[in-house]
Amino acid sequence: MDVETGSTNTSLSWRFPSFCENPTRDTLAEGLLCLLKPTVDQLDERVKATRITQLELKQQIDGLAEELRKIFEAQGSPVDLEAYTNKLINARQKITVVSNILQAAQDRLQKVESQISRETAGRRSLLEPTPSASAALDIRNHPSVQ
């Protein structure tokens, strides 16, 4: 296909012939554009300002890190916190183990308590006579039955 014979018509009017011919649609589109443009422009400016602020913050953090590195190097013997960190990690592990043991003990106690409740309810039902059993006892003790 030659360049001259190929179609170069890519406008909306070729695909939608009545797109730009409707004055109501044009007015509506222009109104929406006028309505949204200030908001989009304001959002764009705020994004740019945020990016600039983030770059400034990054530079300040880098400067602070450099100053801290200089202070650390200038200080002859820094405080060794690794031993204290290891103690805290060990204490946390011990607390976790004790917490797991206490949770398991509490679970077992709850199971024992529920078993005791079931056993107590079962014994009560055996010890307390039912109304039909009471009536049967009354019939046996009645003088006319004997």
Image (tube, rainbow, N blue to C red):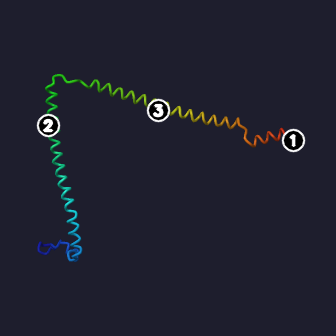
Q: Which of marks 3 and 1 is nearer the N terminus?
A: 3
Q: Is 73 situated above or below 9?
A: above
x 18%, y 58%: residue: 41
Q: How crowded is mark 2: few (under 14 residues within 10 Å), some or many (20 or more)?
A: few
Percent x, y for residue 20? Answer: 20, 75
Which secondary structure lies at badge 3? helix
Q: In which quarter of the image is residue 128?
A: top right
Q: Which residue is drawn at 17% across and 46% down?
A: 53
Q: Quadrant of residue 83?
A: top left
Q: Mark 1 points at which residue?
A: 145
The disc label shown at residue 103, or none: 3
Label 2 residue SS: helix
Residue at image point 30% right, 26% down: 86
Q: Earlier in the sequence, mark 2 or mark 1?
A: 2
Name the quadrant of the C terminus: top right
Which image quarter is the N terminus in? bottom left
Distance, label 2 to label 1, CA atoms, is: 108 Å
State the SS at label 1.
loop
The residue beneath circle 2 is 63
Residue lying farthest top?
Answer: 77
Residue 43 position within the rendered picture, expressed as x and y whole percent measured from the top left: 20, 56
